[in-house]
Amino acid sequence: MKKGIIINSIATTLLLSVFSTGIFAQGALTNSTAPSAIKTTAGEATDYVTIGSQLGYQVAKTDFGALAATFPTVFGWRVANSDGTPTAAANYTLYNSVGTGSLTADADATNNSGYFTENQISVYWPTVGTYKLYTTEKVRVTPFCAGTEENLDVNVLARPKVSGWNVTTSPSGCGLTGDILIPFKCDGSRTITVTYTVTYTPLTGTASTSNGTTTVALGATVYGASNQDGTITIPVTGGNFGTYSVQIDEVTDNVTTKSFASYTTASADRPTAPYVFYSLPTPTTSPIQHVTNL
């Protein structure tokens, strides 16, 4: 009996020694499923995501070596407002790492209430706002010791959009040639990319379409900017008279690229009506002719 107590005491002492520095092994919260090169890394202060996205987060488990099976750990995931106060349940949903089911609550509800078995989770963010995602790693059996709580700031941003055309003077005219500039206003983060379709309908004949993209570079640290200036450039070849219709198809930015494996621009995120301008032939005034007296 005494031998067993001594062995158990040694094991507990070793465990506490390891776990006292476990927060460093655990590391900072990391956004683990962002598909782009701007995904968050350990130690990054803020994770920027787009409303309606579901992203993954993880912490590394503390390495207990040979004691890992004897002393498994659990994780206390929770979400709060950016100031640490409780946030409404409608502002987030915690899911497992594959994003299709709930987290697995620890079976010991008495000692580990609010703790889950997963060290990697995903979170659905349906509401624009600033939040904190928290977790604490804890030994799920006696001695139930826990590390320091880690947190990651999460800024949920509105979808990028082109809010409207910004043309003050119509470019329509006679004998247009060269680049026609169509300005617009947009909202977004870092670099906004606008994809558009131009439909050209000649004075006679069949209409044709072409596609293009334009970017608005706001800067690597600019997030959630509004009312920014952008321009679509339409090259017009002299003699190509007719109607030019410019329709915006997609509006994305770095955060949507990070937040979604695939992203579709909603109709509310772009002008529903295309911008239309005309290139007309310059009128040729003919000689005056005498008309028979009436």
Image (cartoon, helix red, strand yellow):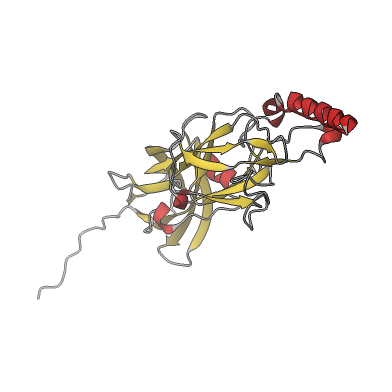
Furthest residue in direction front, as rendered: 1
Residue nearer the viewer, 206 or 13 = 13
Which image quarter: residue 29?
top right
Where is residue 235? Give x, y as percent. 47, 46
**Image: 22 above or below 77:** above
Furthest residue in direction bottom, as rendered: 294
Residue nearer the viewer, 99 or 293 = 99
Where is residue 74? Give x, y as percent. 68, 42
Residue nearer the viewer, 107 or 225 = 107
Residue appearing at x 81%, y 37% in the figure: 68
Can see residue 136?
Answer: yes
**Image: 19 above or below 142:** above
Furthest residue in direction left, as rendered: 294
Quadrant, the N terminus: top right
Can see residue 176?
Answer: no
Residue nearer the viewer, 2 or 241 = 2
Q: How many discs appear?
A: 0
**Image: 241 above or below 146:** below
**Image: 232 above or below 249:** above
| 139 left or right of 166 in image | right
Where is residue 52? Give x, y as percent. 50, 52
Quadrant, the C terminus: bottom left
Which image quarter: residue 35?
top right
Where is residue 23? Give x, y as percent. 67, 28
